[in-house]
Amino acid sequence: MRTWLNRQRLLIEYTVAALGRRRARSLGLLLTYTAVVFVLASVMLFTHALRQEAARVLAHSPEVVLQHLVAGRHALIPADYLERIPRQRGVREMTPRLWGYFYDPVVQANYTFMATADAPPPGHILIGPAMARARGVAPGNLIAWRAYDGAVHTFTVAGILDAHSELMSADLVLLGEDDFRGFFNYPEGQYTDIAIAVRNPREVRNVATRLSEALPDARLILRDEVLRTYAALFDWRQGIVLAILSGALLAFALLAWDKASGLAAEERREIGILKAIGWETGDVLRMKFWEGALLSGTAFLSGYVLAHVHVFHLHGALFRPVLQGWAVLYPRFALPPEIDPLQVLTLALLTVLPYTVAVLVPCWRAATTDPDAVMRS
Amino acid sequence: MRPAPFRPLPSRPRPASTYVLGVFAALIAAFAATFVDAARLRAERAPHTQASIALTARLGLTDPVLMTEARYLRHPSQADLHAHFQDHPLAFDLFPGGSLLPPPRHAHLAQPSATAD
Amino acid sequence: MILQPAIIALLLCAALGFAALALSSPASWQLVRHWQPQSGSRLQLALERRTYLMSVLVRFVLVSQIAALLLFVYNADRMAVQFVGAMCAVGTLQANAWGFPALLAQIALFFAASSWLLLDHADRQARDYPLVRLKFAALLVVLLPLTGTVLALQGLYFGNLRADVITSCCGSLFSADSPSVSGTLAALPPRPAMLAFYFSVLLACAANLHYRLRRRGAWLAGASSALAFVAAIVGIIAFVSLYIYEHPHHHCPFCILQAEHGYYGYALYLPLFAASACGLGVGVLAPFSARPGLRTVMPALCARLAGWAAAGFALFLALATLMIQSSNLILLES
């Protein structure tokens, strides 16, 4: 065991010295490798953390949301709609909801207006933190909007929603029902949709099936559906980014292959001399193995650590412009890190595998070089 | 068949390998530290999640604010089934955020094509 | 098709592995046909050189496939949220007809790969590479078709995976009423199942220990290890899972991998797979220990493997017993 360890140590020693002799090239490859791991790891950590956080939070969204459809479009729910719903055992509570969108030409942003029962007094609103930033307002300030009826409505900012809940509340405007109806000229007695709470979570699907049979013009959105939509959405994002990055991965594998196969004459001579003084093919391969392992290990570890810092301490600063799209309002949130071995294993397979495949054959070619062929040339 | 066994060169290990192995050990330590750091941040940020959960439960929110350009991006789970063409039949999905959305899922309840999608 | 990093990584892994083995198969064929260690011809020299590449290549492919098995199961478990009706890996694997065949092929590849790696290891210990022909023949006949099968099944499975399929959960697959093999396993009465479980795992443990000490009965060690692997899986479905879930009708061998059951599954499966691979290795390697070049190295290697196999089975049995002991479920009234 001791001799084995010592032998590996000497091989590492040689490898390090050899890498040092070609410092610029080795460093270039190492930096590229690290960058590839960093980008992939950032995407995976960010998306996974966001997905887990969304799943945790959305697990508390309404069990069933009932929308009214007219000609395939979401329409307002008439006042008598609630009465048309037969009494369902299992339905605990039905809450009609009022919400909608408003485009603010001042900052060119879309807000989500929502009427709540526990809203501030008439003429006052609660606003989301991202929106407060965009408009530069503080509690007590006045905000005036030109509403859909052409009149200018002025509201007093009663407060700003908890910044910690920004993932869910960035663009919200909360106001009382009368203000909401007045501002949007919303028909009296009509609602946007109905949130339904079900007594027994196992009954949700049955309740929803019965409701959809009784109300053919309704669309029911289950909480499970919402959760699955988001799981698919984040997977899709990860996949899209990965598909885009696969070009970069391929380029990296080509670079590694090129670097390994285009052995400089000097390196070939080195290997020729090593074999002439008694190294076996196996020893050269082992030396090459250590070269690959040191390079991959360093690149993988440092890329991963950098990605961790980037995503969880700098809040994914480099991705923000990409994810932001054209939206003016973008939530600032600190994601709780969710790291699972699956992500790390996938990352390792996605980065180390292509590199190893790319350098295998060139390394073998180098290792089986004939000493006399090299020295004679 | 094989030539004489490998004999290490008669020199002592130079500090280069010690140095490199040290750097490597430090990297492994940093890698392990990210997990410790993750656990710490998770504990620290748990109240943020609680705040979001409280708000979601109180208002019955259905979607996180990821993209706000269009209705189907702001509330993907509530949008019409033919989301990407919902404004008129030839309305292309012109917002960049739309490229980050998967194609609509046609999963639905026992509602055999009650809605066109 | 669900576009997801883990799936992309698995397909990449399977495709690269198959491509590497397929591209090197002409070289393997040449090795099988023309390998003559006594000859000093140019061809023999080239072939000797090539064995290095092939060994490295195959070792790399097989090690990556072992990692892929872990990723495959882990990923199936994680994706369960996306399917209506799925609670754990079973639901994901049942989402179409190719899931379970893909898993079984991956497990078969795991054991074939581990045996091949051990064969390769033994061969490289000897001075004159006595097992080269056998190794590469096995590569062509067993490993190449198997990697191809894995790639094809995974391609079919992931390619046909649709998120809106309603699948069934483990409760229906592993229930006593289910008219399938899994249902039969779940319906096994606990007392005979327990007897069979303890008997076969203890037998494998003893046979491997016997080989370790006396260096006799290698075939028994190998065969009993294979038997113990099957019996252990059957035992986990029939009664160990019940004790872990503390539920008299929940027979799923995958839910134990989840966090809410303390990742007990990994504690059970890792020693079981390792021990079975070592035990099978003893059975595969020992017949060759009489070959001239291997007489010195092989018995020692086999003995070491048998020792690990015995230890692994013992650990598995101890953990399973501990989980049964600490459970609040009472299945047998004594």
Image: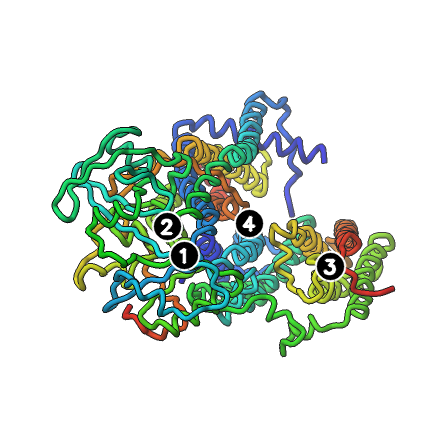
Colour mapping used in the image: rainbow
Label 4 secondary element: helix
Which comes sooner in the sequence, label 4 or label 3? Answer: 4
- Distance of label 1 from label 2 (alpha carbons): 8 Å
Whether residue A101 appears in this view of the structure is yes
- Which quadrant holds residue C104? bottom right
The residue closer to the viewer here, A175 or B33, is A175
Residue C135 position (above or below residue A21): below
Label 1 sits on a secondary structure element that is helix
Mark 1 chain: A
Which amino acid type is marked by label 3? Answer: Tyr
Q: Which mark is residue C56?
A: 4
Residue that numbered label 3 is attached to:
C243
Q: Disc 4 marks which amino acid?
A: Val
Image quadrant where residue C31 sits: bottom right
Vertical side of C300 occupied by C230: above or below: below
Kindly identify which chain the residue marked by label 2 belongs to.
B
Q: Residue at x 63, y 79 (%)?
A: C179
Look at the numbered discs 2 and 3 and tell me whether their residues touch, using CB distance below 8 Å: no
Along the viewing direction, whichever of B35 and C38 lies nearer the viewer: B35
Q: Label 2 is placed on what type of residue?
A: Asp
- For marks 3 and 1, give the CA distance: 35 Å
The Cα–Cα distance between marks 1 and 4, rounded to whole angstroms, is 48 Å
Q: Which mark is residue A226?
A: 1
Residue placed under numbered mark 2 in the picture: B63
Crowd around label 1: few <14 · some 14–19 · many ≥20 (10 Å): many
2 or 3: mark nearer the eye: 2
Query: Does residue C140 appear to the left or right of A299 in the view shown?
Result: right
Badge 3: few (under 14), some or many (20 or more) residues near its Cα, within 10 Å?
many
Q: Are marks 3 and 1 on the same chain?
A: no
